[in-house]
Image (cartoon, rainbow, N blue to C red):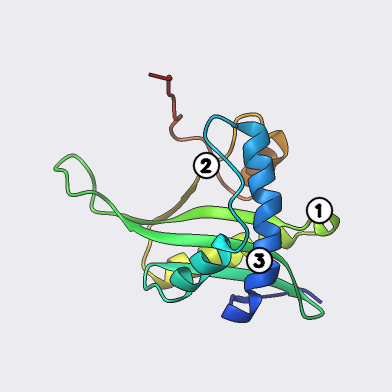
Amino acid sequence: MIMIRKAVPEDAEQIEKLYSVLESDAVSYQPQHFVMSPAGTRSEQLKSILGSETQTMLAAEENGAVIGFAHVTLNKAKAFSCLKPQSNIYLQDLVVAAEYRSRGIGTLLLNAAKEYGREKGAEFFRTQVFPLNEDGLRFYRRNGFEVTMLTIECPL
């Protein structure tokens, strides 16, 4: 049975392995922006996430193994007169081990993240997805996300 829970320091090694899958995808989609992290660096970042008041790491566990995670941050709107004073949660990262995909685990992680956002008083949930990641786009749309703004860039 799949359980969604807050990650703990003891999960670091398993989360590190999942991050390598996520980073590999990022490098393949946008090598101009992404590189693989040196071994162990994500485990160090996990410690700061777990100690934060404005971030959480949710772990999907089955039989004692972490098979997926979601890293969520809580953000406040910038203090500009034209912006509503809203807060949001931002899905920084989400990954499910390949052999566990298409079983609803990503949706369970998103639902737990939504609950975290409600508990923190957030008004909406935001994330980004690579434009060529058609599976990711379908997944997010199935879970209530819609395109509200596009990020565009050019090299200098």
Q: Residues within 10 Å of mark 2 (few under 14, many from 20)?
A: some
Instruction: Residue under label 3, please give it.
Output: 15
Point out the residue furthest to the right here: 99
Figure quadrant of residue 113: bottom right
Image: 93 above or below 152: below
Of marks 3 and 1, which one's residue comes earlier in the chain? Answer: 3
Q: Secondary structure at mark 1?
A: helix
Point out the residue furthest to the left here: 81
Instruction: Residue under label 1, please give it.
Output: 98
Q: Residues within 10 Å of mark 1 (few under 14, many from 20)?
A: few
Q: Secondary structure at mark 2?
A: loop
Q: What amino acid does circle 3 point to? A: Ile
Gap in Å between the C-alphas at discs 3 and 1? 14 Å
Which quadrant is the N terminus positioned in?
bottom right
Instruction: Residue under label 2, please give it.
Output: 128
Where is residue 85? Give x, y as percent: 23, 53
Left or right: residue 144 compared with residue 134: left
Figure quadrant of residue 16: bottom right
Of marks 2 and 3, which one's residue comes earlier in the chain? Answer: 3
Q: Secondary structure at mark 3?
A: helix
Where is residue 131? Give x, y as percent: 60, 30
Tag nearer the camera, 1 or 2: 1
Gap in Å between the C-alphas at discs 2 and 3? 20 Å
Asked whether residue 155 is in view, the answer is: yes
Q: Nearer the viewer, residue 14 or 116?
A: 14
